[in-house]
Image (cartoon, rainbow, N blue to C red):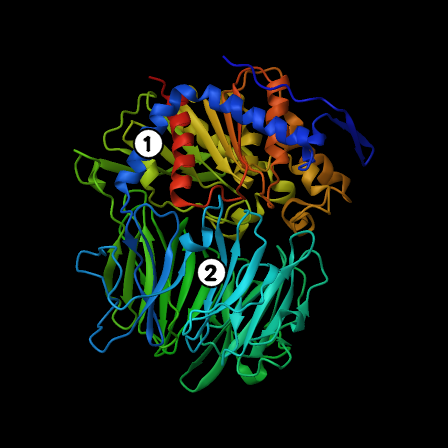
Amino acid sequence: MAAPPAAARVPAERTHHGDTVIDEYSWLAGKENPETIAFLDAENAYTEAMTAAQAPLCDTIFGEIKARTQETDLSVPSRKGGWWYYSRTVEGKQYALHCRRAVRPADTGPPGTGDDGRLDGGPLDGEEVLLDGNALAGDGQFFSLGAFSVSPDGRLLAYSTDFAGSERFTLRVKDLASGETAPDEIPGTFYGGAWSADGSALFYVTVDEAWRPYRVWRHLIGTPATEDLVVFEEADERFWVGVGLTRSERFLVISASSKLTSEVWLLDAAQPGGEFTVVAPRRQGVEYEVEHQVTAGVDRLLILHNDHAENFELAQVELAQAPLSGPAAWTPVVRHRADTRLLGVDAFADHLVVHLRRDGLTGLRVLRSGGSEHEIAFPEPVYRVSPGANPEYGARAYRLGYGSLVTPDSVYDCDTQTGDLTLLRRRPVLPLPGGAEYDPADYEQHRLWATAPDGTQVPISLVCRAGTPRDGRAPFVLYGYGSYEASIDPGFSIPRLSLLDRGFGYAIAHIRGGGELGRRWYDHGKMLNKINTFTDFVACARHLVSEGWTSPQRLVARGGSAGGLLVGAALNIDPGAFGAVVAQVPFVDALTSILDPSLPLTVTEWEEWGDPLHNPEVYRYMKSYSPYENIRTDRDYPPVLAVTSLNDTRVLYTEPAKWIARLQAEAPGGPFLLKTEMAAGHGGRSGRYDAWQEEALVLAWIAATAAPA
């Protein structure tokens, strides 16, 4: 076994609320320090040496992902005005091409779709390429788009690019008729943007030094960016700002939101030089979002809110009464239900579609203007359904996405008048060379329930090969997240097949802190309830073992970002519950980060984790579970693979670097490996082949560690 690099131990003192901590690895926060880069390079070399024997398996798995994927592929076109918009990929190319084709009189539906729900992947006849990601990326190691928005008249394209992974984008405007890009560029922008109705003005967002999007600007087309004006600035450091349009495109929308509170401002999109007006002034703890609709002669705002409605309800207010109105003036459209979490609403000329969650599964409900309604139903025991691309306000068909642990991602159009579903595309899963066609019947999926220490029943979604024996011999991956009310819904994965076909099972722990069972499920896994998230995950691991699905030495815990905090904390709670751990861009030094308000995201996170800087109770609580603070020396730890990115602005590379350095120095067991992508951000490598290679490395490590040959 190669020896891990020995990180220098440089004592640095930190004192809060009378508690002094000596952090010997805090020096690794110096990104510009050559010694930091040397340490990361040494860890990469150590990881490469320790995984060298897995290289053939990694290459094999990469080949399987590539062979099963239709590399030249086309998304289902979505209609907007006189155009069909879509993206496509080309074999051998890392990034997508973003395209459109004019609507033709003979078009009865999206071009290129067939009765079998597949597209051939080639360019459509008459295609216009709006943006080629490969040409923009050039020979760089990273490329990402932050905005892609065509003006209402279809003449201009606003797009933004990031070439480092830092999520700081440069905004540009392209004339689609001439193909020319305007000479002025706008650096330091955030995701998204919104056009005025006539395309004369573009609204965009910039970030402050802590990476918080806080200003909305107006750019007049044809004028220098230096003349752009700030139309909104958010002073409260807990709040993020975004800008967009209602689906009707009648109003420009500025949304200011913290983790607990929100506020919406509107401006007539036909009057871009006007002043934004607040819909309802913010009140601590009240969240709301706004859509616009004109139906049956009523011009109204639709307001999804949680005022005295824990799981949210949908209300309406006539537009003439809307400015400065509060919940007292709002009339319910879909009332609050304790068993149903309302997630969003899409408004169209003749109907609404409500996105919801019930019994741990997502759903869609169509409300017609005549008063009738129906929910779109699917027969599988676990699945996910979500809104698709629906840019056309007057459309009768509603585009949705569907998939399950065994059903590849599928795109349907639902006739909102009849309820009929039309399959437009099911993602192809190509056979391996000499292999059989993919058959969902070769796999089985289940919904299980584990019992947490406090008696709470925690759902688990599970998939494995049909007939997998329940004698404890099958290796398993248990995935979890459990923060921000984000739900890990059961969906399909081509790379996962490389594990399933090697005898692995795969399970998702739907733990508290996520949103699978409504707002209360989230509230019981945050702030001073956060430890529930970790004990739920351990309970799920122990349940898989007790039911015979696997054994502790063959169970791999996997999580990323806040899910990295999850697996790191669960590992400290019960190291013997797992045979290996994969932590990707892991938030494992949570207390140190949340104590520092100068870091990206920290102040906005205080409503998720608590404020340890000013609250001693929160400080003590976070210190009790932060993985870096609680490494044990009395129990052997299983092998750990941590993957991070040097340019990550959400979870700094420093956290996994310190964590692995300390594990290597103090914890028995292992080995403990760190792989740092030196030219990537929070999402890892950006090119699809690069991303497959990264995933193949992780899957090969999992296979070799949990099910050694």
Q: Is residue 146 above or below residue 493?
A: below
Q: Quadrant of residue 690?
A: top left
Q: Which residue appears farthest toward the bottom when viewing the image?
A: 297
Look at 28% across and 64% down and name the residue there: 413
Q: Which residue is mark 2?
A: 342
Q: Quadrant of residue 460?
A: top left
Q: Quadrant of the C terminus?
A: top left
* Residue 343 percent location from the top left of the image: 47, 59
Report the front residue among 535 and 642. Answer: 642
3D distance between C-alphas at marks 2 and 1: 40 Å
Q: Are marks 2 and 1 in contact (CB under 8 Å)?
A: no
Nearer to us of marks 2 and 1 is: 1
Q: Which amino acid lies under the numbered mark 2 shown in the image of this protein?
A: Leu
Residue 533 visible, this angle = yes
- Secondary-structure class at tag 2: strand
Report the front residue among 409 and 183. Answer: 183
Dot label at residue 661: none
Q: Residues within 10 Å of mark 1 (few under 14, many from 20)?
A: many
Seen in the image, is 168 located left or right of residue 144? right
Q: Which residue is mark 1?
A: 61
* Residue 511 percent location from the top left of the image: 49, 40
- Secondary-structure class at tag 1: helix
Look at 56% across and 25% down and name the residue there: 43
Residue 286 visible, this angle = no
* Residue 534 percent location from the top left of the image: 55, 34
Q: Which residue appears farthest toward the right when viewing the image?
A: 18
Q: Which amino acid lies under the numbered mark 1 shown in the image of this protein?
A: Ile
Report the front residue among 647 and 23. Answer: 647
Seen in the image, is 42 located left or right of residue 491? right
